[in-house]
Structures are given as C-alpha cells and as structure tokens.
Amino acid sequence: MKFKTLTILATALALTLGLSTPLRAGEKKVATFGVAFYNLENLFDTINNNGKYDLEFSPAGSRKWDGKKYWSKIKNLGYAISQMTTKTTPNGPAVIGVSEIENITVLEDLVKNEAIADRNLKIVHHDSPDARGVDVGLLYNPSMFRVLKVENHRLEVPELPRFRTRDQMCVIGLMGTPQIGYSRVAIIVNHWPSRRGGEQESSWLREAAAALNAKIAADLLEKYPDIGIITLGDMNDDPFNKSVSQVLGAVRNKEDIKEGGFYNPFWEKLDRGYGSYIYRGGWNLFDQIIINSNLVDGKCGLRFVAAEVLNRQFLLQPDGQYKGYPLRTFSGGVWTNGYSDHLPTEIFLIKEVNLTGDSPAQ
C-alpha cells in the first residue's frame, strides 16, 4: 500500500480563500468543503442493553469493555477526526458519515472530545434494526452544512423475512457559508450487508442494498433535478464489484458518466494500490464516497476536485507481523488501544462565487 498523502489540485489550492473573508465587488472566490466517511469499528458504550452481542462490549463480556477502554477509544477517534484537515479545509470536513456506532450517546461523547469540541459538530442519528445493534450516522459542522430533511430507508429482503441490517440514512441539506452561498446536496450514509458466508454467496444482499440506493437517488433527482448526491459508506464491496459498478452504476472514469449517473473516484485509487480495509494481506477499498453527475459538472453549484484515503501513519500498525495494517481496537482478542480496522476516506468539493458576487445554483 502506498503511504503518500494526496495533494489536492494545485489550481484549487491557489484559488481558495478563507471562508470568513468578506466579498468585494469584482472578486472571484472558491471555497473548499470536505466530505468524509469513517467506519468507527464497534463504537459501543459499556452498558449491556442489547442482549447477547452487546454483552461482548461490557465489563463482564469477553472483551472486558470497561470505561478505560471506551474513553480511550473516544479519545483516539477524536484525535483522528481532528487530523482531517488540509490547507483549504482547516476546520475539517463539512460532514463525516460514520458507521458501526451503537447509539447516539457514543456520538455525543465523541463530538465532546477535547480534540474536536471547538468544531461544535452536530449529529444526525437513527436507530436501525441491525441484529448486531450498530447504526450509521452523520456528523456535520453547522458553519458549513445545514440539515433540511432526514429520511431513513429500510432494506427489505423478502427471501429472508428475519434479515435485519442497517438502514440507509439520507440527509438532505445545504452546503456552503453565508459568504459563498449554499448548494443543495443529499448525503446517503450506508453500511451494506457483510460478506459473512462468503463473498459470492452474500453478494446478492449487497446488490439489493445498491438497488435501494439507486432508487433513493432516482427519487431525489425527480424532485430536485439539480441536486448533488453523495452516497458514502462501508459498502463491503470494492468499486469494481457488481453491487457498486453495475447495480448502482458508479463508473471508474469521469468521462464515462451519464447525466444522472454516478462517478466513483475510489476505483482509480484502488487500482493504484490504495485501500481502506485489509483482509488476509490484501487491501480492499470498501469505504467509498460516490458522487452524481451534478457534482462532476458543477450543475448543483459544487464541483468535485479530489479524493483521498486518509492513510495517516498514526492510524497504522507501526511494527510487528501486521505492520502497515490499520491500528484497530482489538487484535486477536487483545486490546491494542487503536482506532479502527478501517481507514477514513474523504472527497473535496469546491464552490465558486462569480465576479458579480452571485453564487451558482442554490
């Protein structure tokens, strides 16, 4: 795996100015907004209130999950999020989709962590019916994103009436600032069914999740033709797998995207050796952020410029048999005081204000 940090397009860097700088007649400004995703790897509290699985993450469980370990994980994750900054996004991402969280309480503890408390991050959360008791959620910076509406979509599998997985959370909002203007976007947060039972044997479940995702997007475009759609999450599939590339229809190259279709900038990343999750020595890129054509051509007022796997050195095992792997919370049943078994991912969008001071489509 390559460890160099992606440099955001030099032209965007040169144009980008501070968000708080007042506009002047005749000026043109570009603001950069980050959109990230992070699988937080079993962020459970220490209270057993969810039966057998939750017992594992309690002081009496097999992991001896007590206050020391819980608050250490909160501290680690807070630090990881605090490091999601660039020269053009000094306050971090505008939004961060998250998965593998037990409830809203753990997110409340996370956003209060001293490393990120000054960002005043807000929370969107919904209790899913998942058998393991984990949900998806969204953290957002209210200075860059305003929530308008939240919809939660359940994956129904008629062939498996007792099947329960994470709901797909769709957050519709406005991204921007008073100085630069706002654009309407929809962010769909996902954690698709796992590969339990085998990749091929379980692929039909992820294809069903992708079909639900595609329907959500189609309905959004019918109502808001110019909306920017960002579907992000742990897909439990790579960009080239059928669920993502065929059912959702997310293409590898921007040149191949059709109006209303999806572009997956992380396909090219995987081809270049970047990954977000490792299994039996091989990298996968399950943690993807996929955008629709309105964000590629700028029709919605925001335009995609870059994508990155946040493979920071502190997130990786420094030595030993698993050197270079994500530094997870447990390894072989032993507490390693790490971060997550997944690496975060992020994309960058720019929004321009033209010479008259008017912003593009709102």
Image (cartoon, rainbow, N blue to C red):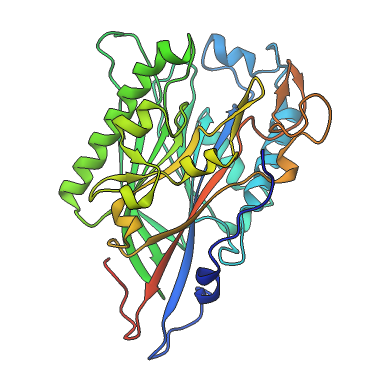
83 and 268: which is toward the camera: 268
Q: In the shown orientation, is residue 331 left or right of residue 95?
A: right
Q: Residue furthest bottom?
A: 25
Q: Is residue 19 visible?
A: yes
Q: In the shown orientation, is residue 308 left or right of residue 199?
A: right
Tell me what residue is drawn at x 22 percent, y 45 percent: 220
Q: Is residue 234 above or below residue 21?
A: above
Q: Is residue 228 visible?
A: no
Q: How many marks?
A: 0
Q: Quadrant of residue 30?
A: bottom left
Tell me what residue is drawn at x 36 percent, y 62 percent: 302
Residue 198 location in percent, x, y?
48, 11
Q: In the shown orientation, is residue 151 left or right of residue 319?
A: left
Tell me what residue is drawn at x 34 percent, y 17 percent: 204
Q: In the shown orientation, is residue 345 left or right of residue 74?
A: left
208 and 136: which is toward the camera: 208
Q: Is residue 324 above or below residue 93?
A: above
**Image quadrant where one finds the N terminus:** top right
Residue 90 location in percent, x, y?
60, 64
Q: Quadrant of residue 218?
A: top left
Tell me what residue is drawn at x 48 percent, y 8 percent: 197
Residue 153 location in percent, x, y?
29, 31
Residue 310 location in percent, x, y?
62, 46
Q: Quadrant of residue 28?
A: bottom left
**Image quadrant where one finds the C terminus:** bottom left
